[in-house]
Image: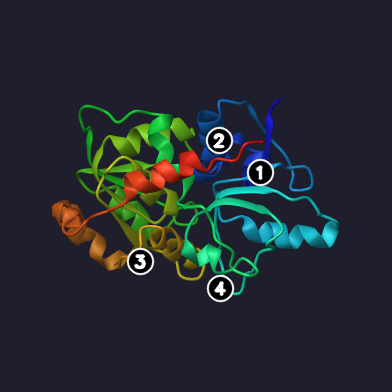
């Protein structure tokens, strides 16, 4: 019997070349942890929600008769004004920002983005192949700044629409990562690759999800690079590692596994 999982499919529902790897990691991670097959289900029929800024979709779905109690494992918030029903089974949420938006703010057993379990899908390589990996959010892929940085010597551009396992393989093979995609940062952390966010778009990407993710580590959100700082990073990427730390990573990983829902 398969786990009926809801995840954000976006344009990928009709075009396989537009499947954002962060969203499509969800069924792969859930299958790896559970040992059960996973199938996509709409919220109306889903048993579970996992990776993604998708909890607000539950609130919208209630207008269309959605009344199921769903198992939540690692999902997160996106906007400050969101709030989420306490009637669901909360096994883990992405961070403390999400917990604060659950009605009544109940205790949640675990925190963390399940993408932190990427090594269950792809082991880390013994050797690095790329100096700097650059993961542009799909809204940034066509920007002048993104194209210019990707063309710099030593920069390897990683396409978020590639097969998820291939994206993991490439990120893990980098010495450093610069990303405007949240899951570019999450997967880098999973493999211990020093990373930094670059902000290339204003108002197009939810800012709160970054705060939410880092709150699981009890960290304030690290400062993001501006587009104008990319040339400096291209010349001296070692500065990304200065002060880089993700203390408590193994505890978050263990908590996610321990509190995976029994469905």
Most foreground residue, 89 or 101: 89
Q: CA distance from mark 4 to mark 1?
A: 23 Å
Residue 128: x, y in percent?
21, 33
* Disc on res. 221: 3
Image quarter of the C terminus: top right
- Determine the secondary structure under disc 2: helix
Residue on which the image places disc 2: 30
Asked if disc 1 and disc 2 are in contact, CB closer than 8 Å, the reply is yes
Which residue is denoted by mark 1 in the rendering?
48
Residue 141 shows in the view: no
Neighbourhood count class around disc 1 (C-alpha, 10 Å): few under 14, some 14–19, many 20 upward:
many
**Cα separation between marks 3 and 2:** 27 Å
Residue 100 in the image: x percent, y percent?
54, 69
Q: Are marks 3 and 4 in contact (CB under 8 Å)?
A: no
The residue indicated by pointer 4 is 80
Of the numbered discs 1 and 2, the one sitting upstream in the chain is 2
């Amino acid at each position: 019997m398969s786990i009926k999982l809801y995840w954000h499919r976006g344009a990928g529902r009709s075009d396989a070349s537009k499947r954002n790897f962060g969203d499509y990691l969800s069924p792969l991670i859930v299958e790896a942890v559970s040992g059960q097959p996973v199938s996509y289900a709409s919220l109306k029929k889903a048993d579970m929600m996992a990776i993604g800024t998708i909890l607000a979709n539950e609130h919208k779905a209630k207008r269309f008769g959605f009344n199921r109690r769903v198992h939540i494992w690692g999902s997160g918030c996106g906007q400050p004004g969101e709030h989420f029903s306490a009637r669901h089974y909360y096994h883990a949420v992405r961070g403390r920002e999400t917990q604060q938006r659950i009605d009544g703010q109940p205790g949640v057993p675990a925190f963390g983005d399940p993408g932190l379990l990427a090594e269950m899908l792809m082991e880390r390589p013994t050797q690095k192949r790329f100096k700097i990996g650059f993961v542009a959010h799909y809204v940034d892929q066509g920007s002048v700044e993104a194209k210019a940085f990707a063309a710099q010597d030593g920069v390897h551009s990683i396409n978020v629409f590639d097969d998820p396992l291939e994206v993991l393989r490439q990120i893990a093979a980098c010495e450093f990562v610069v990303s405007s995609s949240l899951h570019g940062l999450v997967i880098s952390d999973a493999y211990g690759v020093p990373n930094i966010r670059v902000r290339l778009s204003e108002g197009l990407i939810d800012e709160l999800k970054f705060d939410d993710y880092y709150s699981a580590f009890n960290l304030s959100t690290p400062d993001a690079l501006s587009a104008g700082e990319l040339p400096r990073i291209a010349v001296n990427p070692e500065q990304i590692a200065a002060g880089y730390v993700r203390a408590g990573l193994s505890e978050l990983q263990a908590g996610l596994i321990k509190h995976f829902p029994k469905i």
